[in-house]
Amino acid sequence: MKAWLGIGITLAVVAAAVAAPWLAPVDPLASDFAQGLRPPGALGHPLGTDQLGRDLLARVLYGARLALFIGACTVVLTAVVGGLLGLVAGFVERWPATALMRLADVQLSFPFILLAMTINAIVGLGLRNIILSLSAAGWVVYARVVRGEVLSVKERDFVQAAAALGVGRARLLFRHVLPNVAPSIIVVASLQFSQFIVAEAAISFLGFGVQPPTPAWGSMLAEGRDFLYVAWWLAAFPGAALALTALGVNLLGDWLRDTLDPKLRV
């Protein structure tokens, strides 16, 4: 049941984000001061308007596009970089790999969001930099998981037999080892996706991420906190969209873990 719920929520959010130009009633950046702080259900504004008269439904929909884009880019970047580093570190087992894992241990000792926010404050604000900062803070999870899987897989008989037949190290790594650790990478990616979306919203909420007037759920929550007593919808709808998206992706990730991990099917 929870698998179908996760799939349904995730597909609904993706569909809403893709169809945002057609679903949004107006431009999310268009201001109309005469329509400021209209409540939900107002004519032409199903979710109301913000303090500048911008349509909240349009901003939430375009915020979904931005959140999914950042999450997807960050997951791909961290999976590729962290996965490759984990493959090499587990397969080679020389001092550079050991030093890399010690660096990963040190980085894991810092809170993820705090580290990402610090990196983003150093490299600067903007969409590209928020993706890079989240990736720099998140690659270690893939590296640690993949390295542990590689250390186990490379000792199996089929890998040892391929090595005894003279298969090259690169072919051995990418043809025989990588396909057996790919399910773990997929599971970690699905679970990290929601973490990246929430982290981006938290960083934008604190003013270090995507900057206004670009519609981002985190910055919308930050703007809405000043109007909680007079316009609750400014924070309620972006917060609900963020929570619902994180819930759907997490349920989908749990289903993928249960499906791809043979240990959980025993």
Image (cartoon, rainbow, N blue to C red):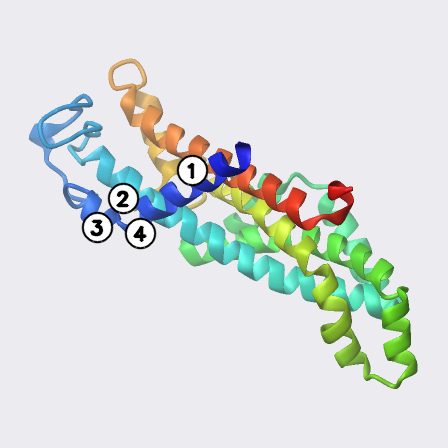
Q: Position of residue 264 (x, y in %)?
A: 74, 41
Amino acid tagged 2: Pro
The residue carrying mark 2 is: 213
Mark nearer the N terminus (4 vs 1): 1
- Asked if labels 4 and 3 touch by Cβ distance under 8 angstroms, the answer is no
Q: CA distance from mark 3 to mark 1?
A: 20 Å
Q: Which residue is mark 3?
A: 21
Which of the two labelled residues, at mark 3 and mark 1, occupies the earlier sequence position? 1
Question: How far across and down, in percent of the image, does residue 227 sit?
Answer: 29, 20
**Residue 56 percent across, percent down from the top left:** 23, 33
Residue at disc 4, secondary structure: helix
Q: Are marks 2 and 4 in contact (CB under 8 Å)?
A: no
**Which label sits in the foreground, 2 or 4?**
4
- Dot 2 or dot 4: first in sequence order is 4
Label 3: element kind: helix
Q: Element at badge 2?
A: loop
Tell me the kind of residue under disc 1.
Ile
At 20% from the left and 23% from the top, the residue drawn is 40
Give the residue at x 17% y 46%. Answer: 27
Are the residues flagged by discs 4 and 1 in contact, CB closer than 8 Å?
A: no
Q: For this rendering, which residue is in front, 11 or 202?
A: 11
Name which residue type carries label 3.
Answer: Pro
- For this orientation, the residue located farthest to the top is 229
> The residue under label 4 is which amino acid type?
Val
Say which of 175 and 61 sits in front: 175
Tell me, yes or no, if residue 205 can be seen here.
yes
Identify residue for label 4.
18
Callout 1 secondary element: helix
- On-image quarter of the C terminus: top right
The residue where tag 1 is placed is 9
| Classed neighbour count for the residue bearing mark 1: other residues with Cα under 10 Å, few (<14), some (14–19), many (≥20) | many
